[in-house]
Image (tube, rainbow, N blue to C red):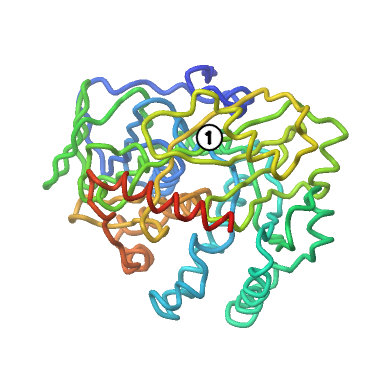
Amino acid sequence: MATPVADHAPSYYAATANDGPAFPALDGDLEADVCVVGAGFTGLSAALHLARRGYSVVVLEATRVGWGASGRNGGQLHSGQRRDQVWLEETVGHDDAKKLWALAEEAKTLVKSLIAEEDIACDYADGIIHGIHKRKYIAEEKDYIDVLRERYDYHELSYLSEEETAAALGTGVYHGGTLDRTAGHLHPLNFALGLAGAADRAGARILEGTRVTAVREGTPMRVETATGTVTAKAVLLAGNGYLCGLDRRTEARVMPINNFILATEPLGERAKTLIPGNEAAADTRFVVNYWRLSADGRMLFGGGENYSRDFPKDIGGFVRRHMLKIYPQLADARIDYAWGGTLAVTPKRMPYMRRHSPGLYVSAGYSGHGVGTSIMAGKIFAEAFAGDQERFDVFQRVPSQRFPGGRFLRYPTMVLAMTWFAVRDRL
């Protein structure tokens, strides 16, 4: 029986979501090989890959499949990790930097193969353009293209002149750009719903409306909810920005922040003048703007963040200011949808993937780079549970640090840091 998605947070994605299977809430006590907390990209990928290996897996979701960042984000599938390869080489060494690049390349392939294998209707399209917002960054971007070609044999990233960028993006505000031909974009909620269907068919048990209240470490692990428990050999915390209260070690290193997106009315023929190649787009700001066209010709534009528990009262107006700096020609476009969501960041903007004890794993803090990384993280966790820790350990070796002030003072220090970066973006 098809399930309506009206209880997802209102958004363009929720309004255009595919039908998906109905999942009940937990009622009683269960046993499984693995209990996954969170039915977003990470949790659903882990469930699918575990079930394909023959393990019993239970996924506990507090609300609905894809309810969090997985179903609300910009839908951009990037190349590489959140930090560039030069930074990674300096931080983890050349060998692990190469492994992280290879894992990111595999992540793109994995997303595309899952879409094809499971027949997931999520409007996937190739291509991401990055606009260079400061002229002094041009040389750096050109040098990085050479790094990827010479040290990583990656030839799909090319430089766009100022004129080429203006033609590709329908705006003259950038000094140049880059085009990544094997990156891409998709409808994230429909991708999440498709993953859930695939995991369900593979034998995973997904339970919605089941909020985890505690995780008790031991042998076995015990996951508690208001309506029952799950006893398992291992637990994967896959709630990203929604893990508050479940693991203090993670909370000290992974912080939730809010980001916001709008969708205009369908723009008709005008849409073709904005991004004629139908790539996704973003820019080089630290507080990044990102945008793309929807399948029905709307501008989907993301910009602006905040670091409190509350969203702006007028999300559409909040994001529209950012959009009009790039596309003043959309001043007359009606805003049909505007929404916010909570993602999670780490101090160094690399994912926090750790095994805290023999039975407790966490994967979170994708820092706005999660579409591919989270799907790959789920697969890597399944490998680790099956006894092959090698690829999970590559991420474990990436240095992690606590936010200054720890769990309780991380927000004020983050606000100060992000305010400085926002000022730097404008200079």
Q: How far across and how far down the image is residue 333, in percent?
A: 76, 27
Front-most of 267 and 278?
Answer: 267
Crowd band around label 1 with a 10 angstrom C-alpha radius: few (<14), some (14–19), many (20+): many
244 vs 175: above or below: above
Q: Quadrant of residue 146?
A: bottom right
Q: Secondary structure at mark 1?
A: loop
Relative horizontal placement of residue 162, taking residue 227 as reference (left or right): right
Residue 85 seen in render: yes
Q: Position of residue 87 (x, y in %)?
A: 47, 72
Front one among 404 and 396: 404
Percent coordinates x, y for residue 384 in the rendering = 32, 59
Number of marks in picture: 1
Residue 136 lies left or right of residue 22; in this view the side is: right
Could one spot residue 17 in this view of the protein?
no
Residue 330 location in percent, x, y?
Answer: 77, 34
Q: Which residue is mark 1?
A: 72
Q: Residue furthest right?
A: 269
**Residue at the (33%, 21%) spot, across then down:** 25
Quarter residue 397 falls in: bottom left
Which is more toward the observer, 206 or 266?
266
Residue at 54%, 25% in the rendered image? 20
Residue depicted at x 18% and y 56%: 358
- Which amino acid, by three-letter code, is at mark 1? Arg
**Residue drawn at 72 percent across, 61 percent down:** 179
Instruction: Look at the picture and state if 116 lies above or below 92.
Output: above
Looking at the rendered image, the quarter that the C terminus falls into is bottom right
